[in-house]
Structures are given as structure tokens and as C-alpha cells.
Image (cartoon, rainbow, N blue to C red):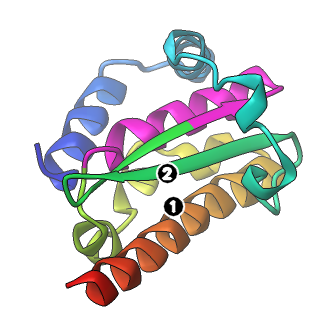
Amino acid sequence: MSIEEVQQEIIEEFQFIDDWQERYEHLIALGREMPPMPEEVKDNSKLVKGCQSNVWMDAKLEDNLLKFTADSDAILPKGIAALLVRIYSGQSPENILQSNESFISEIGLQEFLSPTRANGLLAMIKQIKFYAIAYQAKMRRNA
């Protein structure tokens, strides 16, 4: 599935949820479903800068596709991270860098989040794009 297809799937999921409390609960459920990162991986180098809570994110390149893992010590940021992992994991660095984040406004996520949580969301996306840049450069060096 392309990034756009996954984003569209998420938009459609959220369209069926009218109440913000239920959307909030859906995000929390996504976080609970995401497997935790092993404790030995959760070091300071994996912390996402700009998040109010501790959010760890890691990426590995497998068959020229990035595989993301994430975790948080707070349930809502973990749900947001799970949403982003669902969108970007299994995608090429190039596709990640060319993607846009319009799904955020289409599901109304920024309106729902407090300013500090919205900043955390943007910090997580920025971290994903940094991983994509780093792995894209590595792939070019190895080509």
C-alpha cells in the first residue's frame, strides 16, 4: 500500500467517528495495540526532540524500505506514534520524503490536540523524515 492509500484508509476510519472523545479513545487503542519497543533500544538517541512526553522512535532499512518502531511513556502520544508507524513503515525513504501530511487536517487531528501535543506530532513526523534522509543518503553511498 502506498502512503497515500494508508492515509486515505485512516481518513475513512476517522470519518466514521463523530465524537472527539471516541476519536481520542481510538488513538489510545492504536497505541495499546502497538508492540512496545524493547527497553534496551529506548536510549536518548532514539528520543524524539520536541515532544512533551518521552517518545522513542527507531528505523531500520530492510529491502530498501524503512521499518519504524516507536513507543511512549504516555498513552496518547503512543497512539499518535502508532498512527505514524502505520503510515510510514514499509515505505521507501524517497516516498516518505515526497509525502505530505494533509491527512492530519483531514481527520481534524491538529484541532483536537493541545498545542504541545500538536508540536509533538510534528516533531514525530520530522523525525521520520530525518530517518528517511539519512537512509536515502546511505543507500546512495552504497549504490
Q: Secondary structure at mark 1?
A: helix
Amino acid type of disc 2?
Ala
Which quadrant of the figure contains the C terminus? Answer: bottom left
Q: Is residue 40 highlighted in magenta?
A: no
What residue is rendered at 54% in x and 44% in y?
109
Q: Picture coordinates of residue 66 (x, y %)?
A: 34, 53
- In this picture, is 88 found above or below 13? below
Q: Quadrant of residue 138?
A: bottom left
Instruction: For the N terminus, give its image quadrant.
Output: top left
Q: What segment carries the magenta color? A: 70-90
Mark found first going from the N terminus, 1 or 2:
2
Q: Are marks 1 and 2 in contact (CB under 8 Å)?
A: yes
**Is 123 situated left or right of 44 in this image?**
left
Q: Residue at x 67, y 23 (%)?
A: 38
Residue at x-position 81% and y-position 62%: 49
Give the residue at mark 2.
59
The residue shown at (51%, 61%) is: 128
Residue 110 shown left or right of residue 13 in the figure: right
- Estimate the x, y position of residue 69 in percent, counting from the top left: 52, 37
For residue 42, the mark is: none
Residue at the extreme front: 142
Amino acid type indicated by mark 1: Ile
In x, y percent, where is residue 31?
58, 20
Report how far apart the C-alphas of labels 1 and 2 lie in the structure. Answer: 8 Å
Nearer to the camera, 123 or 63: 63
Asked if the magenta segment contains residue 84, the reply would be yes
Q: Which residue is mark 1?
A: 128
Taking depth in this image into account, of 19 and 49 the one nearest to the observer is 49
Task: Please tell me whether the stretch drawn in magenta is mainly helix, strand or loop.
Answer: helix
